Amino acid sequence: MDWKQTIEAFRHNPTEESFNALFVAVYGRVRRYFLLRGTDAMTAEDLAQRVMFIVYNKSYELADAGLFQGWLFTIARNELLQHWRRGQSRIETVELEPLAEQLTIAGDLELRAEFAEWLSLLEPNERELVLLRFVEGLSYEELALAFKTPLGTVKSRLFAVREKLLRIVENKPVRSFGKKAR
Amino acid sequence: MRHGINEENWENYLDGKLPPEERDRIEAHIIGCVACWEFQQRMLALNARLREVGAAMDRSHVLSDEQLSAGLRGVYAMICAGRDAAAPPTPVQQRLDELAAVMTVFCGTQAAASALQTAAQRSPARSLKQVTRENWEPFLQRLSAIAHVLCGRTGAHLVWESGRF
């Protein structure tokens, strides 16, 4: 079962068994969310468990199960902000050093080191958008929910980030026709 | 907006989310426009790289069964703690609270708490958490005996009377 089936199963019949299945499907991703944003492993586990606790208690409030991922990462984002506020020592952005470290742990080393380099050239909000879209696989609708932004704005921002990434990856202007075409 | 295609439409097109008529319009333009065709190809290549990164990230951070079990235990501990906090106190718990309040007047909070614990340990319940209606009577007798020493005869009498169901 993928996460969509597991969340439907849990909302339909909230038993220990259905929650365990949902937990197995999403806990690793939630934990990774915190790791990629600079927390140590123990904090990432604590925060991920808090997120899953909220999922356990509140998932019935979610009107559309199709938006589960957007809702999930909104909770994760809030937990992270609260964690930083409690510590009062972190800026509220994706931390680059641990991010690069996480991205280069074991396997696919070259690819992920390259990705970490691309991300380092993006603004914090752009980086968050790229991570949620391409690493966590959120849909446009889920991104709109997570960023509390209209759908059209999410798409425009995402396209702008893609253009910027293209510029970074190729190290040249995105569209050669850009100015001439105006 | 460039060449009649805005950013949102490009985004939808690259993601395969455009309605057929709009997709056909963009594709008709791309066929005749080298710059847009080249841009589309570069964007598709970038998308493929990003998908590859996403897949690589999924292959990493795979949790062991032990890590999953530990995480799950942590969540269930929170769930249980939440239930305990939300649950109304049981009649036994209410009575224990009343007894503690009575004894506190005579001998202070710390001595009252110690007296309750000692009485429970020396009764069949063996611990305060395991005091129930069934083993209440011997517990209350022990507590009254302790209260007699700590609070005098009046205090012990009050404890006995307050504690009876």
Image (spheres, coloured by chain):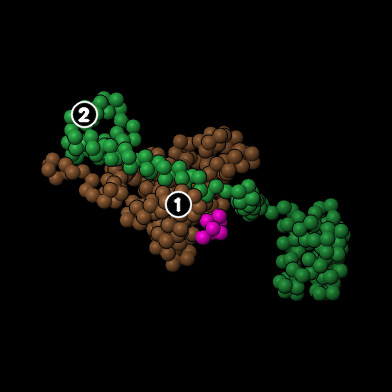
Q: Colour of chain A?
A: brown
Q: Is residue A168 above or below residue B97?
A: above
Q: Amino acid at mark 1?
A: Leu
Q: Which residue is tagged 1?
A: A109
Q: Which residues are magenta?
A: A40-46
* Residue at image point 38% right, 52% down: A114
Using the image, tell me which numbered label, if any, was put on residue B31: 2
Kindly indicate which chain is depicted in green in the rendered structure.
B
Q: Quadrant of the N terminus of chain A?
A: top right
Give B162 or B86, whichever is nearer the viewer: B86
Q: List x then y, in percent, for residue A86.
A: 48, 64
Q: Chain of mark 1?
A: A
Give A168 or A50, whichever is nearer the viewer: A168
Q: Are marks 1 and 2 in contact (CB under 8 Å)?
A: no
Whether the magenta-drawn stretch holds residue B14 is answered as: no
Q: Amino acid at mark 2?
A: Ile
The mark lying in front, picked from 1 and 2, is 1
* Residue at image point 57% right, 48% down: B63
